[in-house]
Image (tube, rainbow, N blue to C red):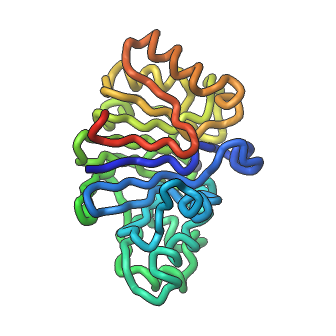
């Protein structure tokens, strides 16, 4: 029994700032364990408005893949909601070191609300309740960033923001592959390090997932209509590809 629910599919600044798509992140539920990944701006509101409602006080943990605001904007208020206003010390916060130390995106007084803080590092394994996951090598992104491999059934890989690098397709071999694809086309010397559809093709050809879910769209992807891009990719690669929409729920048993 499990599901992933997308409470936002916006990526990068303009789509987030203008809320062309929501930017709430992802809720993963396996058995009785609930984990929230990347609570961007609006995460709390999206949870409470979700149908059926997702109650943050049932979360067992919150994870930041990195400290950028589109992934962490609501982390403080989500921790407060998980811990019932800070009155109930509970839950685990997972985050890279640079999201917690100097210039932390999690306020010091809020850090004290959780039962445990687990610092994400390279090639490490973690467990929270019924959810096991591991990190791989550090992504190429301006701040410390990790993708995730979940030992769920089916297995899920979660490629968060990064610039493409040659080892990337070999690191994420989950049956379900969630890819953060900000750009339609690559930009030569991209100062903001993100994946494009060309990179996604390279990854799918090598990693051969059962299902690819595109999300975290920037303006060029929104303009190209992500569902059209996904259908074209599916046709070209002969591999199932869908574009996430705000509120999309994937039941793990059905994949
Ligand atoms: Zn980022």
Report the residue that reaches farthest toward the right: 18
Left or right of 39: which side holds 4? left
Q: How many numbered discs sit on the rendered protein?
A: 0
Task: Provide residue 252's location: percent of width, then percent of height.
Answer: 31, 42
Q: Which of 234 and 190 lies nearest the eye of the viewer?
A: 234
Q: Residue at x 55, y 67 (%)?
A: 75
Report the residue that reaches farthest toward the front: 52
In this view of the protein, can residue 173 be seen by the observer? no
Q: Residue at x 62, y 25 (%)?
A: 184
Q: Residue at x 64, y 29 (%)?
A: 221
Task: Provide residue 197's location: percent of width, then percent of height.
Answer: 54, 24
Left or right of 81: which side holds 205? left
- Up/down of 227 relative to 60, above or below: above
Q: Which of 13 and 97 lies nearest the eye of the viewer?
A: 13
The C terminus, quarter of image: top left
Task: Provide residue 224's location: percent of width, then percent of height.
Answer: 67, 23
Q: Which of 83 and 122 lies nearest the eye of the viewer?
A: 83
Quadrant in the rendering for residue 96: bottom left
- Up/down of 206 relative to 102, above or below: above
In this view of the protein, can residue 201 be seen by the observer? yes
Task: Provide residue 206's location: percent of width, then percent of height.
Answer: 33, 22
Q: Residue at x 64, y 59 (%)?
A: 41
């Amino acid at each position: 029994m499990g599901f992933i629910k997308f409470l936002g599919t916006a990526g990068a600044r303009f789509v987030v700032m203008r809320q062309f798509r929501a930017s709430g992140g992802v809720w993963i539920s396996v058995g009785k364990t609930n984990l929230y990944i990347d609570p961007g701006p609006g995460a709390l509101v999206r949870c409470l408005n979700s149908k059926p409602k997702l109650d943050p006080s049932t979360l067992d943990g919150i994870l930041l893949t990195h400290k950028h605001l589109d992934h962490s904007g609501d982390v403080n208020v989500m921790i407060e909601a998980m811990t019932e206003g800070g009155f109930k010390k509970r839950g685990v916060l997972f985050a890279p070191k640079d999201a917690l130390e100097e210039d932390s995106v999690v306020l010091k007084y809020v850090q004290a609300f959780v039962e445990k803080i687990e610092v994400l590092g390279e090639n490490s394994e973690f467990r929270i309740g019924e959810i096991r996951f591991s990190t791989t090598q550090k992504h190429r992104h301006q701040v410390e960033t990790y993708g995730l491999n979940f030992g769920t059934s089916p297995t899920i890989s979660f490629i968060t923001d990064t610039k493409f690098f040659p080892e990337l397709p070999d690191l994420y071999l989950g049956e379900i592959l969630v890819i953060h694809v900000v750009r339609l086309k690559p930009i030569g010397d991209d100062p903001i390090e993100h994946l494009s559809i060309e990179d996604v093709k390279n990854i799918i050809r090598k990693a051969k997932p059962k299902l690819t879910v595109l999300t975290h769209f920037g303006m060029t992807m929104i303009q190209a209509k992500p569902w059209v891009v996904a259908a074209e990719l599916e046709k070209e690669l002969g591999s199932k590809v869908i574009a996430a929409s705000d509120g999309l729920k994937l039941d793990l048993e059905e994949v």
